[in-house]
Image (cartoon, helix red, strand yellow):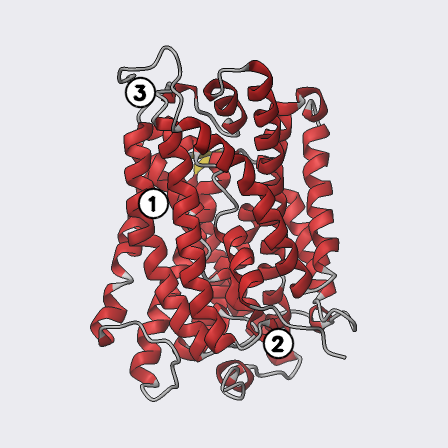
Amino acid sequence: MRPRKVTLLPLIAAIFFMVFGGPFGLEDIVAKAGYTGAILILAITPLVWALPAGLMVSELASAVPAEGGYYVWVTRAMGRFWGFQEAWLSLVGSVFDMAIYPTLFVSYLGHFAPWVTAGHRGLWIGVALVAVAALWNLRGARSVGQSSVLMGLLLLAPFAVLMGYSVVHRVPAAGHAIPLRGVDLLGGILVAMWNFMGWDYASTVAGEVDRPRRTYPLAMAGSITLVALTAILPIAAVAATGLDPNHWSTGGWADVARAVLERPVAGEILAVAVTIAGMLGAVGTLNALVLSYSRLPGVLAEDGYLPKILTRRHPRTDAPWVAILVCSAAWALCLGFSFVKLIVLDVLLTGLSLLLEFAALVALRIREPDLPRPYRVPGGLAAAIGIGIPPAVLLILTAVRNDAEPMGPINALQLGVLLILAGVAAYFASVWFGKRRGFMPSTAVVTRGRERR
């Protein structure tokens, strides 16, 4: 029997974790921009970064609901070379992206029990977390979606308590504006972009989603609303207490909970609950992203770019078990980078892949105007072009910020450029090896998704 497919609510929950995973990581925005700046950034960034991506994904996922998602869209719209670059940017970006969540997990655990993460123990805890997510994904996409619903409810419960308490209580010493010591608006925007990035991730499992043409647009609308509300409301509630924004730091929601609640025992209980929620958020996001990224190697292997062994699937759950294990081993290698370094590389590489998807949206409008589109970005071709402009502007700002972030002997922008050039070399190397094996992938790649209509 074929495994049951992912339905609407589990898909919304999975997208929530793929994109956001709760307010964790937003602490750096408050520290860099203050409360007013953070709320403005979190209100504007979804409009110019998340909403355009959600509209684009809704159209392409409903028009071409194929396993491999964005890789298939770009390949079909612009050819094999650009499709490969799309997959390369996503997979290389995933190496840095997937290391972020074990880092956050260890950070929150360290706030709760510093001795547990001391020395090299934090690194091994991160490796164990990647292994748990890999094993979880072997149970299949439906299992990941259903567990995301439960973890989402548990994750948001402590923030509901914190918000309720914040709106009726103030920190005793509050009452006047507190100047921010270290202002870094571009850094705050960068963190916000990372927190609102990944709307296309769920597209790679389209073959495992129930009625994808109907489900994807609804899931995009639901998840964008959920992410925007759960990002802004907790910070706005704490801002009303007058808590010093200089006290915010990565993984610092537990400290915020202690400071907001005036009663020591209640504050400590809520701090523990927020810490556990932070760890759940990291686990849920890591788990959902394993689901997304692990589907790409299998599709690339089917098209002749990677070894065929990566196409093997579990007979009961249909999970690509070889790809999951290989990817998890690669992700575990980057657990030593700092939080900020991981973010700048992730946003640069994944942001470029997102721009290729916007280009695919326009190219398919021109090349296949009669393609059935259950959902269409309103406004015609001009609107399809226009929604890609704001994300491009934000990405340019990110490149400026990355140019100042050191990564050893070179900065983050230089390392990103080297990784992008490596993708060009990897494409021609894979084509050369494919020809030697007598495999020409062009027909299989470009036509994938047509038969699924």
Q: Looking at the image, which is closer to me, 346 or 281?
A: 281
Could you say which quadrant of the image residue 243 lies in? Answer: top left
Could you say which quadrant of the image residue 275 lies in? Answer: top right
Q: Is residue 228 above or below residue 293?
A: above
Q: Which residue is mark 3?
A: 180
Farthest right residue?
315
Q: Is residue 336 above or below residue 330?
A: above
Residue 429: horizontal and vertical position, in percent? Answer: 56, 68
CA distance separating discs 3 and 2: 54 Å
Q: Amino acid at mark 1?
A: Ala
* Residue 304 numbered tag: 2
In the image, is 215 to the left or to the right of 309? left
In the image, is 95 to the left or to the right of 58? right
Residue at 40% over, 60% down: 354
Q: Residues within 10 Å of mark 2 (few under 14, many from 20)?
A: many
Res 99 seen here: no
Q: Is residue 6 above or below residue 155?
A: below
Discs 3, 2 touching: Cβ within 8 Å: no
